[in-house]
Image (cartoon, rainbow, N blue to C red):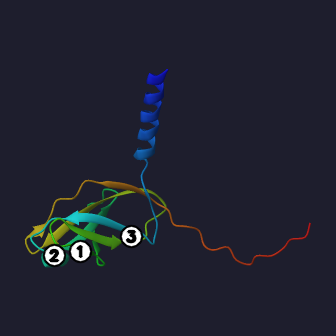
Amino acid sequence: MKKWLVIAFVLIGSVVYAQNPTVGPNDSFGWGQTGPDLATVQAYAYKYYLDGATTGSLWTNVTCSGTVSPFACQAKTPTFSNGSHSITLTAANAGGESPQSVPFAFVFGNPPTTPNNIHVIKG
C-alpha cells in the first residue's frame, strides 16, 4: 500500500512540473549571460527566435547586472499571440552571433480588457 502512495506522489509531481509557465505582457524573461565583464555583456545585441523562426527579433530593452559571470540579464516580454510558444536566444557582438540557446517553452496569456459600464438589470 505504501509503495503505491509514493509512486502516485512522484507521478503527480511530474505532471505539475511539466507544465509551461504562463507569461503576460507585464512580465520579463531572464537568463544568465557569460562574459568577461558586465560592460561587455551589456553591449551585446540580444535576439529572440519565436517558435523556431529562422530570423530573430532584436531585443532593445535588455538590462544586465551582477559582479561576476554569468551575469543576470532580463528583458520585457514582447507581445505574442495567446497560446503556447517557445523562444531561443542569441547574443552577438562584432565577432558574430552565438548559437541559439535551448528552447524555452511558455504560454502567453494576455488578460482580457477591464469590464466597464456596470449596471443593474431588473428581473
Q: Are marks 1 and 2 in contact (CB under 8 Å)?
A: yes
Residue 94 percent across, percent down from the top left: 9, 75
Q: Is residue 56 visible?
A: no
Give the label on residue 77, or none: 3
For badge 1, the amino acid type reads Ser
Residue for point 16% across, 59% down? 99
Give the label on residue 90, or none: none
10 sits to left or right of 74: right
Q: Nearer the viewer, residue 24 or 57?
A: 24
Q: Is residue 79 visible?
A: yes
28 sits to left or right of 100: right
Task: Give the image quarter of residue 42.
Answer: bottom left
Residue for point 42% across, 69% down? 27
Q: Secondary structure at mark 3?
A: loop
In the picture shown, does residue 4 fall above or below 33?
Answer: above
Residue for point 48% across, 28% down? 5
For the C terminus, the image quarter is bottom right
- Which sits earlier in the primary sequence, circle 3 or circle 2? 2
Residue 53 percent across, percent down from the top left: 30, 60
For badge 3, the amino acid type reads Thr
Badge nearest the viewer, 1 or 3: 1
Q: Which residue is mark 1?
A: 65
Q: Which residue is mark 2?
A: 38
Residue 121 percent across, percent down from the top left: 86, 71
Calculate the distance from the C-alpha at mark 1 to the C-alpha at mark 2: 7 Å
- Which sits earlier in the primary sequence, circle 1 or circle 2? 2
10 Å crowding of disc 1: few (<14), some (14-19), many (20+): some
Task: Give the image quarter of residue 118.
Answer: bottom right
Badge nearest the viewer, 3 or 2: 2
Residue 41 percent across, percent down from the top left: 16, 73
- Which sits earlier in the primary sequence, circle 1 or circle 3? 1
Q: Secondary structure at mark 1?
A: strand
